[in-house]
Amino acid sequence: MLRPYADVIIDITHTAVDRVFQYEIPEELFGGLSPGMKVRVPFGQGNHLRDGYIIGFSEKPDYDPLKIKKIEGVCEDGVLIEGQLICLAAWMRERYGSTMIQALKTVLPIKRKPKAAQKRYLVRNVGREECEELLMVCRKKNQRARVRLLEAFLTDETLPYEMVVQKLRVSAASMKPFLEQGICRLETKSCFRNPIQGNLRKGTEISLNEEQRRVTAGILSAWKGDRKPCLLHGITGSGKTEVYMEVIRHVAAEGKQAIVLIPEISLTWQTVMRFYRQFGDRVSIVHSRLSAGEKSDQMERARRGELDIMIGPRSALFTPFPNLGLILIDEEHEAAYKSETVPRYHAVEAAIYRCRLAGAMAVLGSATPSAVSYYRAQNGEYHFFQMKTRAKEASVLPSVEIVDLREELKAGNRRIFSRRLKELMGETLKRKEQILLFLNKRGYAGFVSCRACGKAVKCPHCDVSLKVHQDGKLKCHYCGYETPIPRECPSCGSGYIAGFGTGTQKVEVMVKAMFPEASILRMDMDTTSKKGSHEAILSAFADGKADILIGTQMIVKGHDFPRVTLVGILAADLSLYSGGYEAGERTFSLLTQAAGRAGRDSLPGHVVIQSYSPDNYSVEAAASQDYEGFYWHEILYRKLLRYPPVYRMLSLLITSREEEEAAAMADTVKRQAEAADGEGILELVGPARASVAKINDVYRYTFYAKCEEEEPLLELKQRIEALDWGKDVQHQFDME
């Protein structure tokens, strides 16, 4: 009789062991194993016990059965990986370049199974009559704590222990005689932790306007039909969330579950409130600020089918729903959907692939769709829907004006606040309305610009901003071009040329000096480091406890504050010249999203965009909320320079503690790529030093390959992976 074997991936992140190993299943584990289980197996010449994951089974041995080792046992703290997620991990490994174990760990939101949460209860052991007799005795003895406990027992035979101690104020000493005499007993039950705290009131029934109903009907028609991905382009305030909820309502009625992806934790608070008020306890969340126990419990609730909706950033994509029907990706254009660790997957692409595996449908929504998604929609790869009006009848798009900071400099104003913005802030505060001040600090990447003419110093070969290095040079991280930092502007000859940068904390100090009577909140990485800090700041501002909210990108994405009537965008240039071919797209999205926070209710809104480049097409298009005008300008630029989405691009990061080894390997990769490109269809760029050339004494080099088709790039990736990388040189791939 043939013995059954398990195919196991060993938990070692090294390419040398990035393959399946076959193990014999011992008799005591027959019928007790399934794909995705974590097991302990002997590995290597010393038979050291290692963790591994079962990804399949086979009946025939791949080599001499006498040499096949046996599985030692099942890891008790292991978290089961669903079969569908194993397939997704294999796709991620193939597409983005990583070991299989790295991909498997990525699709595991919970790495280890934490201890179950325990809840204690006091349970009445005696009958009602005996309880009433005891109550009379305790009243005569004036034992007030026990009286409160017995009165509660007459109402309910089972009482939560915490409620007895905290609300009834019954101490352990007061309970002890009852427990010893068997009047009541203490029981402990496992329970799920609930990350959604507090009682959220039930919302009113959703009432869609004509445009929302039309889009909802179209998306549901696609869901009942070919389930091709859908792109929903709706201006800020058009009511995309209401459409999402109505679509989910229909999908849930069919017994299917939905995942709602949001780009950042800061969006969780308002998003969860809106969904929870409509769907109640069938909604949950998962994100990095939850405890391991909270995350584990939400995944288990999803696995059991006790949830209909999971909301969260990238990791929510891997929720183990048994009947997944829909994945909604809100603000789909956001860079936060792209992982910065291996495998460097894009959550939008991974979501679409998971939908194919599950027979589900992906819906991408944004006021400023990514150029990639809009390009695919224009080419018929996605269904396309538009919403061009704001949902609330009294709400209209805010008026937007651009302030030229070059003119401010000529007038002698060197502060980050223009005279116009300061004037409007004073008027807004007098009306008791609220203000958002947005500073894209994350866009700052060491570029040099001229305050007089507004132009940044760019690479003559790649049309991206040059970056400042510690050696006093400006360098291009695409092609390697470098030049000394100029003392005068190359465009106009002005001496007002320098790096640009200021922080939210400095802005806060300046605002307090200008408006000492105003109440101010600041929201950035420093003020949101603690658990619950996002919710605390946003809820305080929503409740009117502050007049001004100062912050980075996290304050301008998807939030709805009815009393915000003024938005000040302090420095549009920080993202405009932050480097990379997507700088214009990032700027347009940020400015449009920021502007969309103003005037979302009956109060009219006003937006001030401060820029040294007011005539840049990204700034002008954002001011007029003209997405189509921006897109056609941007896509022409991408075609001319052969950037995605018109061309596909494979990027490679090479790292080593020895700079010579990293540089030598980069040259080897380039030669391999040139040899592989027999038909001359690839465009090779680099190698060059990375934007951050050294981190923790590790040197970094980049290399790029472009092609109209994706397949040649995937073939090139496989060739590069097959090279002898040695122990000291590492690499990471990224596919765009």
Image: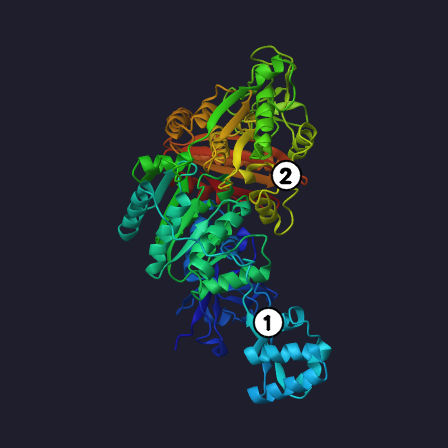
Q: Quadrant of residue 322?
A: bottom left
* Callout 2 secondary element: strand
Which residue is more in the foreground, 337 or 396? 396
> CA separation, marks 2 and 1?
38 Å
Give residue 522's mark.
2
Quadrant of the frame with the N terminus: bottom left
Image: 268 above or below 279? above
Amino acid type, residue under disc 2 in the picture: Arg
* Callout 1 secondary element: strand
Residue identifier under label 1:
119
Q: Position of residue 284 (x, y in %)?
A: 49, 57
Amino acid type, residue under disc 1 in the picture: Lys
Image: 92 above or below 8? above
Pointer 1: residues within 10 angstroms few (<14), some, or many (20+)?
Answer: some
Which residue is more in the foreground, 135 or 438? 135
Dot 2 or dot 1, earlier in sequence = 1
Which residue is more in the foreground, 598 or 676? 598
Quadrant of the frame with the C terminus: top left
Pointer 2: residues within 10 angstroms few (<14), some, or many (20+)?
Answer: many
Relative placement, left or right, of 246 versus 262 is left
Give residue 267's mark.
none
Q: Quadrant of residue 452?
A: top right
Q: Position of residue 712 (x, y in %)?
A: 39, 38
The residue located at (43%, 75%) in the rendering is 31
